[in-house]
């Protein structure tokens, strides 16, 4: 019987190799612990914000998310407080990308007893679902959900954003002037880089001085690039876009017009409406 030959012996790892392996284990363990702490903190903050919203706005039914498009409760809690400020009369909220957030914003407006939410959605199926949720929550009179299909943008906007499509302009023209809150949670990333970059330039003349502009999913590189596009556009158009806070996965900015441009912006807004 033939005895199989043993494999050629391998050299034992050197002390340097072992030390490098230990270093990598320590670094990975530290990174993993940091990630676990960050996720645990996020879950706690989201749960606290969710309980706050249910206690503050008291929806008549449970408001659940559809599929994987979850709601960012932290930013909704922040917006609830901002919209509810007594100094703010008849707030106008524009939301790009509808969902359960539309119902929460509608509840906030309903509780304030004035104001309006305009939500733009490119997907007819998702729009129908959002409208059903809004009806169940009882805020159909406080929310206008507009079907805004994606279409080719004019060359100037394409050059600015690098993305050839955005919401149909005819649909957006239904928005009134004096937008106090622009909540950008669409279009989805499936439309490619720069899909949301047109939001601030397209609504620029309809924003009130001091309006809050909120960009969701700020942890993504595409959205971070969109912010740079917005800031450059603001400077070129005689405005300032200042970062106020990052709440959950949303960045909040304050839109201010330089004094010499306020009259021009108000005239353009009236024409747009």
Image (tube, rainbow, N blue to C red):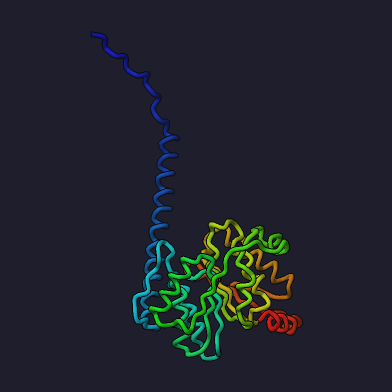
Which residue occupies the extreme top position in the image?
A: 1
Q: Position of residue 184 (x, y in %)?
A: 55, 70
> Which of these two is toward me, 199 or 38?
199
Which residue occupies the extreme left position in the image?
A: 1
Q: Position of residue 212 (x, y in %)?
A: 58, 77
**Rendering quarter of residue 159:** bottom right
Q: Measuring 41% from the left and 74% from the top, which residue is drawn there? A: 132
Q: Measuring 72% from the left and 80% from the top, which residue is drawn there? A: 268
In the picture, the quarter occupied by the C terminus is bottom right
> Which of these two is toward me, 53 or 39?
53
Looking at the rendered structure, the number of numbered marks drawn on it comes to 0
**Rendering quarter of residue 15:** top left
> Which of these two is toward me, 125 or 9?
125
Q: Position of residue 186 (x, y in %)?
A: 54, 66
Q: Measuring 57% from the left and 62% from the top, which residue is drawn there? A: 223
Q: Position of residue 72 (x, y in %)?
A: 45, 69
**Rendering quarter of residue 208:** bottom right
Above or below for 133 versus 149: below
- Residue 163 appears left or right of 83: right
> Which of these two is toward me, 18 or 263?
263
In the picture, the quarter occupied by the N terminus is top left
Query: Is residue 98 among the parts visible in the rendering?
Result: yes
Query: Is residue 251 among the parts visible in the rendering?
Result: no
């Amino acid at each position: 019987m033939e005895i199989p030959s043993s494999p050629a012996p391998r050299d034992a790892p050197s002390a340097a190799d072992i030390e490098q392996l230990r270093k990598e284990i320590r670094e990975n363990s530290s990174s993993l612990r940091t990630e676990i702490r960050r996720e645990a903190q996020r879950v706690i903050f989201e749960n606290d914000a969710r309980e706050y919203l249910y206690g503050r706005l008291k929806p008549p039914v449970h408001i659940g998310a559809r599929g994987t498009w979850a709601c960012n409760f932290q930013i909704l809690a922040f917006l609830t407080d901002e919209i509810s400020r007594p100094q703010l009369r008849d707030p106008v909220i524009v939301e790009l990308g509808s969902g359960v957030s539309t119902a929460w914003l509608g509840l906030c407006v309903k509780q304030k007893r004035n104001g309006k939410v305009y939500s733009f959605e490119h997907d007819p199926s998702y729009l129908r679902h959002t409208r059903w949720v809004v009806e169940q929550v009882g805020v159909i009179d406080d929310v206008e959900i507009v079907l805004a299909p994606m279409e080719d943008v004019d060359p100037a906007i394409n050059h600015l954003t690098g993305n050839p499509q955005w919401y149909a302009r005819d649909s957006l023209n239904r928005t009134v002037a004096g937008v106090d809150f622009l909540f950008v949670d669409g279009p989805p990333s499936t439309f490619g880089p720069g899909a949301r970059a047109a939001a601030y330039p397209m609504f620029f003349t309809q924003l009130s001085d001091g309006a809050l502009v909120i960009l969701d999913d700020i942890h993504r590189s595409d959205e971070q690039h969109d912010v740079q596009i917005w800031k450059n556009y603001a400077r070129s158009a005689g405005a300032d876009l200042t970062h106020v806070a990052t709440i959950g996965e949303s960045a909040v900015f304050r839109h201010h017009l330089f004094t010499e441009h306020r009259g021009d912006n108000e005239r353009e807004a009236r024409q747009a409406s």
